[in-house]
Image: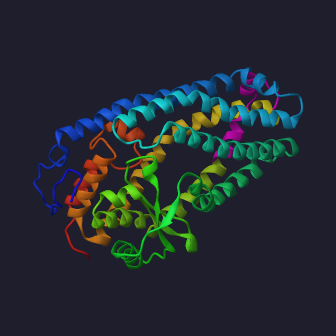
Amino acid sequence: MSGDGSQPEAPGAAAEAGPDSDFTPEQIARGRALRRGVLPLVLAGSAAAFALTAALGLTSAGAGLVAAFGAAWWARVAGAAVTLVLLPFVLGLPFAARGRVVRARFGLVTQGWRGWAVDQLRGLLISLPLLLGALFALYGLAGATRWWWVWAALGAAAVTVLLSFLAPLVLEPLFNRFTPMEPGPLRDALLALAARDGVTVRDVLVADASRRTTALNAYVSGFGRTRRIVAYDTLLTTADPREVELVVAHELGHVVHRDVARGTVLGALGAGLGVCALAAVVTWQPLLDAAGVDRFADPRSAWLLAAVAALGGALLGPAGRALSRGVERRADLHALHLTGAPGEFIAMQRRLTVANVADPDPPRLLHLLLSTHPAPAARIAMARARPAGRP
């Protein structure tokens, strides 16, 4: 069964099939209305955060703010971490809260304001110690050796790898509760699917996503002996078992193609190279003069570092999202190959699109700049071109 109540279709459907035939006008309008409601908030929030960072990093205002925490080196490093976390957080709260209101109007939010506030605070309490440790290490190195950027690059790469391993075990449980899936046909089917794909998983878990959202999802997390299949409880109570298999087959594709490992390696390499690039820019004297500091080793330069990093992230973002879309398309192809069920894949894409209130076919420019996944219409068209039956 699909999200709009229709039955799975065979590939090779009518050539004119597209968003208008796969989704009702109401479903298309609903997805576009949510996009129009949320996108301006996302863009405005990002623009406000960038403006704040630029205003404090490219002028002496940021240096003065950090200096207000005292003359001691450690106090200024701590002050830099606190202001870099708290100010963007406070500035972004109205945009995040308004976005939550908009999503709630579309039935995507099940969590109360108190739970939402606790999640925001929890995220803050995670990011602050991480940034505090990073800045103490960075400015300690910058004050100790002229080759600080080499050691900082190696450290950034190592931390990227470490967090990739620890996130499923340490960070994920901070935001969701996970319980083993009850023994039964679906659990057996998912384990058999992983075995047929040559992927060893330790367990199949259910995440209590319903206490926050009605959105549907599943994923495979962990490495080696810690790898597990995780399904949202919303998916299990909404989708047909065959559709759940297809979502998991897509996620298994990421494992088979080593997307997490590749992503970790690329992330570590990018982090290291990013530190080298940042070092070249933030030690440029005209920028230091604009920021009101004599040398980068002074912790008062932290906001300059943040401004340059934000600009670099904005410039490289579209390329990263294009790479992500290619990876997701390959995982879709893997799911179709593994299951040989393009009709059910189409039904599953319809269900996910409708349940998540997504725009089936967003404007091309927005898609190229902002989307990390192929558009639902493109994923459905790809499935229609695939023959049914396992190879």
* Residue at point 14%, 47% (across, down): 21
Q: Quadrant of the C terminus?
A: bottom left
The relative height of residue 158 versus residue 204 in the rendered view (above or below) is above
Compared across the picture, whether 114 is left or right of 337 comes to right
| Number of numbered tags placed on the structure image | 0
Residue lying furthest right: 72
Compared across the picture, whether 169 is left or right of 1 comes to right
Residue 235 in percent (x, y) is at 36, 57
Compared across the picture, whether 132 is left or right of 73 comes to left
Does residue 189 show up? yes
Q: Nearer the viewer, residue 176 or 305?
A: 176
Provide the major secondary structure of the magenta segment.
Answer: helix
* Residue at point 53%, 54% (across, down): 176
Colour scheme employed for the rendering of this structure:
rainbow
- On the image, which quarter does residue 104 sit in? top left
Q: Quadrant of the N terminus?
A: bottom left
Q: Nearer the viewer, residue 75 or 186?
A: 186
The relative height of residue 245 versus residue 136 in the rendered view (above or below) is below
Residue 236 in percent (x, y) is at 35, 61
- On the image, which quarter does residue 101 sit in? top left
The relative height of residue 139 versus residue 332 in the rendered view (above or below) is above
Does residue 283 show up? no
> What is the magenta range?
274-295
The answer to if 293 sits in the magenta stretch is yes
* Residue at point 22%, 56% (across, down): 2
Compared across the picture, whether 353 is left or right of 89 comes to left
The relative height of residue 228 versus residue 31 in the rendered view (above or below) is below
Residue 64 in percent (x, y) is at 78, 22
Residue 361 in percent (x, y) is at 27, 42
The answer to if 85 sits in the magenta stretch is no
